[in-house]
Image (cartoon, rainbow, N blue to C red):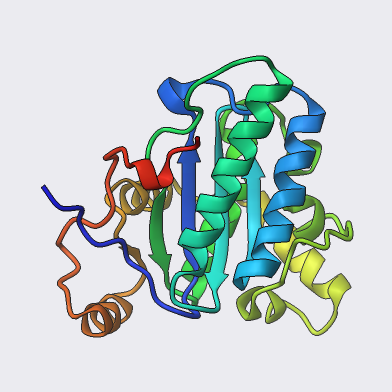
Amino acid sequence: MPRTIRPNLVNIPQHVIQRGNNRCKCFTENGDYAVYLDKLYEYSQKFGVQIHAFVLMTNHVHLLMTPLYEHSISLLMQALGRYYVRFFNSRHKRTGTLWEGRFKSSLVDTDSYFLQVMMYIELNPVRANMVKNPGDYRWSSFQGNGADKDIKLLVPHRTYLALGVNDKDRLTTYNQLILSRIPKHIVDKIRQASRSSSVFGRDEFKIKVENQLNQKQHLAWGGDRRSNKFQSK
């Protein structure tokens, strides 16, 4: 049975999730996280992808990024996944696959929906009861978006830049937003969009996506099917 189509439009942000196979750990020490982020930066530059937010959990990753070219994100995730599996297996003396098949992705509306996904990603360690505040988690873009750390990987999206006239104002506004957390029904909608590889946004945005892709929004995009193309060697 052929794969269903993954939603992909140039200059429209995507929320990407990749999980460890059978929920296995993908990161076990600081060096693992550091290498993943270094290679994420390298491949984002190589393939033309802007990274706006990220969080590296022990057994999965969340990325919010915008492709500048048609297949930018797929090329980035393929290259990153293959490199990191080779690195991780060699470092930890293991063999076999690490990732759970194809990554999940959903298109994100660039109005308030974008900030909701951004906060959802950076609050992940809080929801997982790993830390009390997002700033207490080291391997998250909140260190740059909310704590004024210089992270070369991050490219601020225009929606984030619109939060203030300068860096200080943006940090203050974003911290106020993230402290209010995200309502459960919004969390559920973000998760549903991710699981179904569909669109998270306004009805008008969904119609725009349907028209551009020439495919109805209710069709299933993406999926969990394993593919040699996305498996590490």
Residue 40 as seen in the image, left or right of residue 182: right
Q: Can residue 130 be seen in this view?
A: yes
Relative height, residue 92 to residue 156 (above, below):
above
- Which residue is painted at 37% across and 70% down in the image? 8
Looking at the image, the residue that sits furthest to the top is 93
- Residue 115's spot in the image, x, y percent? 56, 65
Locate residue 45: give its quadrant.
bottom right
- Which residue is painted at 60% across and 48% down in the image? 80
- Front-most of residues 179 and 160: 160
Looking at the image, the residue that sits furthest to the left is 1
How many labels sit on residues? 0
- Residue 40's spot in the image, x, y percent? 68, 53
Residue 223 as seen in the image, left or right of residue 141: left
- Residue 217's spot in the image, x, y percent? 20, 68
Relative height, residue 70 to residue 55 (above, below):
below
- Which residue is painted at 71% across and 50% down in the image? 39
Q: Can residue 50 be seen in this view?
A: no
- Which residue is painted at 61% across and 73% down in the image? 48
- Residue 166's spot in the image, x, y percent? 85, 80
